[in-house]
Amino acid sequence: MLVAATDTTAATTVWAMTALLKNPRVMKKVQEEIRTLGGKKDFLDEDDIQKFPYFKAVIKETLRLYLPAPLLVQRETNEACIIDGYEIPAKTIIYVNAWAIHRDPKAWKDPEEFSPERFLDITIDLRGKDFELIPFGAGRRICPGMHMAIASLDLILANLLNSFDWELPERMREEDIDTEMLPGITQHKKNPLYVLAKCRI
Ligand code: HEM
């Protein structure tokens, strides 16, 4: 429970900040939305965040490109079955390559681009009903902490973006931020992300 909950949420937070710092246009747009619609509150709560469609799209786009469990959790077949003409014997270990599904050009236009706008005019959701986007898995073994994860990510990220302006260290440019990953069940950023936080108020 501890690893499944904390590691994934922490990794996703770092990936979201990485993607936003690499894409200043998106950073500006999402901060403008949060600061305009959120009023002048010091702390944004769950109700405030439901009013931020672009921010919600940023979370989806982060979990599309940087899903923390790229192969979900492996499964084993109970009995033999046939999928797409392939015979899968009983007791076969199955990995679902969600990373590849999330970057499949048949499902996504310009799949490598970080573009939250793509979610503004489509209804694809990440809660396991749309198989193009399954950062929490799907079916009976879907992540049982999904709702807590989404609520935590909402609160952490919206408040980081509301309270601080974020800058790169001197002489560092957006293109210098790497997206290399560490191997492991949870996909963490390999090299630490260096940023300067300036309190907005
Ligand atoms: C961004 C955050 C998170 C992501 C992306 C995530 C993703 C996943 C995925 C992909 C699975 C495997 C599902 C499958 O194979 O179909 C999983 C399983 C699991 N998750 Fe999460 N998770 C997150 C946060 C959490 C949180 C906050 C909790 C608990 C409070 C949690 C608890 C679990 C547990 C216990 C399992 C194993 C379930 C089983 O074996 O049936 N996760 N998670």
Image (cartoon, rainbow, N blue to C red):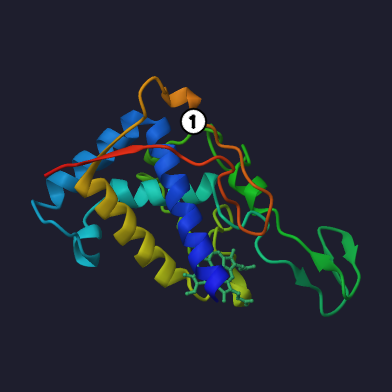
Q: Residues within 10 Å of mark 1 (few under 14, many from 20)?
A: some
Q: Residue 151: which quarter of the image?
A: bottom left
**Residue ID at (82%, 67%):** 93
In the rendered view, tell whether residue 95 sits above or below residue 114.
below
Number of callouts in the render? 1
Q: Where does residue 172 sit, x and y in percent of width and height?
A: 42, 23
Q: Where does residue 46 sit, x and y in percent of width and height?
A: 24, 66
Q: Residue 1: which quarter of the image?
A: bottom right
Q: Is residue 93 left or right of residue 139?
A: right
| Residue 109 seen anywhere in this rendered image of the structure | yes
**Residue ID at (30%, 61%):** 155
Q: Where does residue 21 sit, x and y in percent of width and height?
A: 38, 34
| Residue 129 seen anywhere in this rendered image of the structure | no
Q: Secondary structure at mark 1?
A: loop
Q: Residue 137: which quarter of the image?
A: bottom right
**Residue ID at (81%, 58%):** 84
Q: Is residue 93 left or right of residue 148?
A: right
Q: Is residue 41 left or right of residue 106?
A: left
Query: Which amino acid, by three-letter code, is at mark 1?
Result: Ile
**Residue ID at (53%, 62%):** 7
Q: Where does residue 124 sit, x and y in percent of width and height?
A: 46, 54
For ligand 1, the image quadrant comes to: bottom right
In the rendered view, tell whether residue 73 sits above or below residue 193.
below
